Image (spheres, helix red, strand yellow):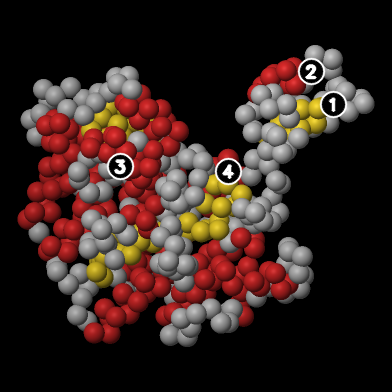
Amino acid sequence: MRKFDTKIQHLKYKVLREVARLAWEGKLMEKVTDIPETLVPGPKATMRCCIYKERAILAKRVGLAMGGNRENKNVIEVISIACDECPMGGYEVTGACRGCLAHRCEDVCPRGAITFDDQQKAHIDKTKCVECGACAKVCPFSAITNHKRPCQNACKVKAISMDENKAALIDNDKCIACGACVYQCPFGAISDKSYILDAIDLIQKGENNQKYKVYAVVAPTISSQFAYAKLGQVITGIKELGFYTVVEAALGADMVAAAESRELAEKGFLTSSCCPGFVAYIEKNFPDLMPFVSHNLSPMATISRYLKETDPDARVVFIGPCTAKKAEVQKEEVSPYVDAALTFEELQALFDSRELDITTMEEGVLDNASYFGRIFARCGGLAEAVAQGLKEQGLEDFELKPVSCDGIEECRVALLKKSKNLLDANFIEGMACVGGCIGGAGCLTHGPKDKSQVDKYGKEAFEKTITDAIRVLNCE
């Protein structure tokens, strides 16, 4: 069974695997001076103009696998030298233009960018075009198309433009680190930085001096990943890597659901704080709505805080589907509790860097959270959990009117309505990725988002209520 959707994902994984393997062996230099021989393509393997450019790009990939540019706080970076094969983009007149007499495209163009040749075929002057799209809308033959780059199409917050060399350029003031551009780039020219070396360092130091334990906090989305093995085998594999134990972030979700439902009943209106991409979007685009964002930390940070309060010497590594979690870990209010964040792609690389065949392992147990904590992984799950939290805490008199936003575009609509006092809801559940966390950029596969898998995993939980899950936690 294939572990990845695309060859780009597989290439990224191979770099991560080799960097991790050398790190375990203590053979990795702090600076990229040599590229592992297992990654160097032969002359016939390159898709670029020459092997030298291919190796230069590979050196950049290795650098990102080792943490990237630490001075750039954004966890998403562009490998500019690899970003040179996409079309320029913008509106263009295709061969479907029939040279009609109506010239509607010319009439609606606000900048006079459209002219005609002696055959009456339209042409667009790129120096005048502002890409408003008016011409494309009125063309009766649909002869004008917009050739946007895949990364620009994927970025719903308009954070990507082109630099003077026509390479992708990320505006950090707009980027929410959702990683949509990472998955959609067909050349792997945009990637998230990896903190896989930080995780290995934590494990090795913990094993060597035995002064602290390293906890793995896994997102509930793990239930839909690693389809080639059983979930219990994945849990055993994580422990084989050197983690002391594996804890569900969904248990933190139970804690958040209880606290957030109380906060909602008290304040009367709230937006969720669980998705770091959604929170970043509010910060950058709707700052006046920041007071309405729940004051609770995300499930990841909440359970990690509990672990460190219980075991002050603990170290915590989060593993999930989200590139934005890597940015969240850097935030002042979260960094004391989470030491590193990895994606499922990186977890697969860790397994293979130690040559761990998880399909041969016994099944471990992962049973910390309730059904309601686990369904945070899909859009609508948080709203259901808050409704349950209100019910369990005797706050049923509060009428919950939620709106669950599936993807950043739906988030924008809901926030815009709220900013204009037109929203008929008192709770906004915001998910930056379509489908929710199961659509995260760091997933192993990105096929159809099957929410039923999340619900099935939730129903397997031993604790059936939020209260029971938290009670068990407090008794431990």
Q: Identify the residue position indicated by label 2 in the image.
A: 103
Quadrant, the C terminus: bottom left
Quadrant, the N terminus: bottom right
> What is the CA distance from the residue labelled 4 to the residue labelled 3?
29 Å
Q: Identify the residue position indicated by label 4 in the image.
A: 152
For the point 69% across and 33% down, which residue is it? Answer: 129
Q: Earlier in the sequence, mark 3 or mark 1?
A: 1
Corner quadrant of residue 263? top left
For the point 43% across and 57% down, which residue is it? Answer: 74
> What is the CA distance from the residue labelled 2 to the residue labelled 3?
52 Å
Q: Amino acid at mark 2?
A: His
Q: Identify the residue position indicated by label 1 in the image.
A: 116
The numbered mark at residue 376 is: 3
For the point 20% across and 69% down, which residue is it? Answer: 314
Q: Are marks 2 and 1 in contact (CB under 8 Å)?
A: yes
Q: Earlier in the sequence, mark 1 or mark 4?
A: 1
Q: Position of residue 262 (x, y in %)?
A: 13, 36
Q: Earlier in the sequence, mark 2 or mark 4?
A: 2
The numbered mark at residue 383 is: none
> What is the CA distance from the residue labelled 2 to the residue labelled 4?
29 Å
Mark 3, mark 1: which one is toward the viewer?
Answer: 1
456 is higher (above) or lower (below) than 179: above
> What is the CA distance from the residue labelled 3 to the residue labelled 1?
55 Å
Mark 1, mark 4: which one is toward the viewer?
Answer: 1
